[in-house]
Amino acid sequence: MKRALQSIGFFRHDEALLKKIHQHALDIIESCGIRFHSDEALEIWHGCGAKIDGHLVRVKGDVIEQALKKAPRSFVLCSRDGKHDLTVDGKHTYFCQDGCSALTLDPQTGARRSSRKEDVEKMALIGDYLETIDVVSPMVSAQDAPLPAIQAHELQACFVNSGKHVITVSVSEARQARSQIDLAAAVAGGKEALRRRPLFTNVICTISPLTQDPGGIGAALEFARAGIPAGLYSMATAGVTSPVTLAGTMAVLNAEVICGLALLQIAVPGCRMFYAGGPATMDLPTGNYTSSSPEALWLRLMVAEMANFYSLPSIVGSGATMSKDLGPQSAWEHALSFLLNSLAGADLLFGLGLLDGSNLLTYEGLVLDAEIGAIVRRLLSEVDLSDDAFALDLIKELGPGGVYIDTMHTVEHMRSALSIPALSNRDSYDQWSRKGALSRVEAARLKTKEILETHQPPPLPDDARRAMAEVLAAYEQTS
């Protein structure tokens, strides 16, 4: 989706504000420091002249700034089928399924249960079908897979059931990163082929406030060295793991992200990486984590703003409604989130398809969110303003009272000028009643069933399937 409104400066924060957030983050990194619980990271920082006190690292601002300048602004997120490659260049916004949920509303019984690999497989298949979904992700954890190889099983489920690029999010140590790299190499045709065409991206979470855990940083370094795009994703929560003020939360988030990204660039200059985040707020009456409050929506659009400030690609946490069911709250929170983050210039919106703050999967939820995404995409797409589109000759020919429905101009332009919804209902009341008076949730449920019964993903060669099976078996035996 090209951001037409972006091109005319529709939505831009004051550059002075972004610079202030940057300077405050550098101050935090140099004077307060970031904790790196990783001997490898400490060794890298030691080589840059950082001040190290135990696990606390203090780095001068110019070291951070020079490291970030080495990162590429543009690269390609490659797809397994070769038909869904995505250029990350600051000019497009792409939509990705959410990830990491541990609970599912069973589509047959409606009961809430622990998620399984079968859920990952089915949601990847639905994501492969939906045109709005540009990137698929393991939306839930494959909790029935062998524990030492869960992360590899989740990636394998996506590769088998979709030809699109994949984002993984549940990796927390270097060994798990290697399992996914080896699995993707089995599909790509080797590690060098994977380096040339990275079939997946990984997102590593920081630990707010101002901490990087050893497993996450170790995994990020593994991905960077293998040529896999990696993102450092802060989930700073205002009032809990960062100051309650939005400005203070942005300073903490920015310090965490840029310090981690600088480390990756120092270790692997020019590696592909994302500035990423899904900050949240505390709910004052309950103290609960809240990912879709007005304040959280502002923090998340600021993730995209800061990424643009650094000329870095962005992954922005989006969606993640706090609603426990599919209804008005989930609709308005997701619509606002997708729209604001797109207007702010996010490269990739991570967060379609889950409820309860990304804790709960409903199969039909992804279909509903894809419809919201399609509306946002259409709203922000470029409008044809050519002489032919203005149709002045036709307007003059038909004059006052003219009818346009049967003209060749309408026939030639109607499909590009006007959109056809996949799920939104535009029937008259009587037409809707005759068709069963279905709610949009019921319609999405039927669409989900149809996709699962009929959609066929791009086939995987037998040798790739065998190679993936060997990788899974190897990692299942070790820990």
Image (cartoon, rainbow, N blue to C red):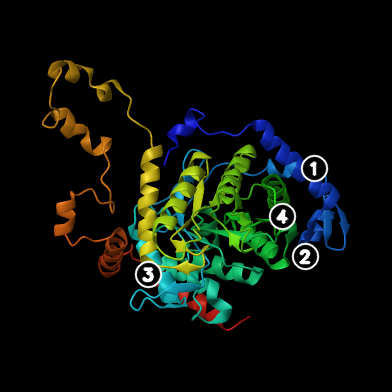
Q: Nearer the viewer, residue 454 or 79?
A: 454
Q: Which residue is mark 2?
A: 37
Q: Amino acid at mark 4?
A: Ser
In the picture, which quadrant includes the C terminus? bottom right
How far is the residue under mark 1 from the one under mark 2? 21 Å
> Of callouts 2 and 3, which one flags the residue occurring earlier in the amino acid sequence?
2
Q: CA distance from mark 3 to mark 4?
A: 37 Å
Q: Residue at x 79, y 40 (%)?
A: 62
- Badge 2 density bin: few <14, some 14–19, many ≥20, Cα 10 Å: many
- Residue 11, image x, y percentages: 53, 34
Type of residue at label 3? Lys
Q: Which residue is mark 3?
A: 122
Per the rendering, the mark at residue 211 is: none
- Choose top left, top right, bottom left or bottom right for residue 38: bottom right
Q: Is residue 162 visible?
A: no
Residue 280: x %, y % from top left? 61, 55
Callout 2 secondary element: loop
Residue 315, x across and y down, in percent? 55, 50
- Kindly state the secondary structure of the residue where label 4 is placed: loop
Residue that badge 1 annotates: 61
Q: Amino acid at mark 2?
A: His
| Callout 3 crowding tier (Cα within 10 Å): few <14, some 14–19, many ≥20 | many
From the top left corner, tell me how far across and down residue 376 is, in percent.
Answer: 40, 44
Q: Earlier in the sequence, mark 4 or mark 2?
A: 2
Mark carried by residue 242:
4
Q: Is residue 166 in view?
A: yes
Give the crowd class for mark 1: few <14, some 14-19, many >=20 residues within 10 Å: some
